[in-house]
Image (tube, rainbow, N blue to C red):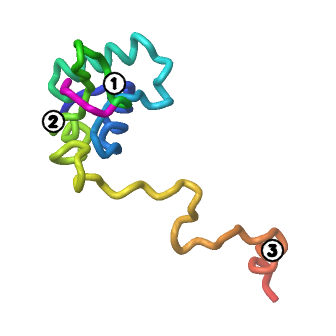
């Protein structure tokens, strides 16, 4: 199994959640990471978990070379490293979204019983 640090996991999982699979723009949780984010991206590129390729989408641009614009994108190996499967970030490969954390779990009451209700249930009649 591929060992990834927290920054690399954030980058890959964010890219997997995007339709285009782009690591850029950086997620807000690491947007101010500077060199740490740059080092994480370099390591992902070196390991083949992300790749640099030409893009027309200005929001995905990592660097330019003349008129060419390049972004960093999730690879199949990168998606597999975070257990997303084949096709990293392209249409039709997304997993089901996690349930919202504020939703109550199934089969639980909407609110806990009050103290008087609990006391009445415990005391014999």
Mark earlier in primary sequence (2, 1): 1
Task: Check if residue 56 falls in the magenta segment.
Answer: yes
Distance between the alpha carbons at the discs numbered 2 and 1? 16 Å
| Distance from the alpha carbon under mark 2 to that under mark 3 | 57 Å
- The magenta region covers 52-57
Of pointers 2 and 3, the one earlier in the residue sequence: 2
- In the picture, the disc for residue 5 is 1
Considering depth in this image, is 5 or 124 the residue closer to the camera?
Answer: 5
The reply to whether the C-beta atoms of the residues labelled 3 and 1 are less than 8 Å apart is no
At a point 15% along the width and 35% down the height, the residue shown is 77
- For numbered disc 3, what is the local secondary structure? helix
Q: Residue at x 38, y 31 (%)?
A: 59
List x then y, in percent, for residue 13: 34, 38
Dot 2 surroundings within 10 Å: few (below 14), some, or many (20 or more)?
some
Closer to viewer: mark 2 or mark 3: 2
* Cα gap from disc 3 to disc 1, whole angstroms: 50 Å
Of residues 14 and 90, the one nearer the viewer is: 90
**The N terminus is located in which quarter?**
top left
Mark toward the start of the polypeptide (3 vs 1): 1
Q: Quadrant of residue 108?
A: bottom right
**Is 109 placed left or right of 7 in the picture?**
right
Q: Which residue carries the number 2 mark?
A: 77
User: Which of pointers 3 and 1 indicates the residue nearer the eye?
Assistant: 1
Which residue is at a point 38% across and 18% down the rendered structure image? 37
Locate residue 121, reporting x and y percent: 75, 80
In-image side of 117 versus 112 (left or right): right
Residue at left offset 32%, top offset 24% = 61
Q: Residue furthest bottom?
A: 125
Q: Is residue 24 left or right of residue 42?
A: right
Within the magenta stretch, is there residue 71? no
Q: Please name the residue that numbered disc 3 is placed on.
A: 119
Q: Residue 45 lies in what quarter of the image?
A: top left
């Amino acid at each position: 199994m591929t060992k990834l640090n927290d920054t690399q996991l954030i980058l890959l999982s964010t890219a997997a959640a995007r339709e285009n699979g782009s690591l850029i723009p950086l997620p807000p949780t690491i947007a101010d990471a500077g060199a740490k984010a740059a080092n994480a991206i370099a390591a992902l590129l070196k390991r083949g978990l992300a790749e640099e390729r030409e893009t027309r989408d200005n929001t995905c641009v990592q660097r330019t070379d003349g008129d060419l614009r390049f972004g960093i994108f999730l690879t199949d190996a990168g998606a597999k490293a975070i257990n997303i499967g084949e096709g990293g970030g392209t249409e039709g490969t997304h997993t089901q979204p996690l349930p919202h954390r504020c939703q109550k779990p199934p089969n639980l009451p909407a609110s806990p019983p009050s103290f008087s209700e609990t006391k009445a249930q415990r005391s014999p009649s």
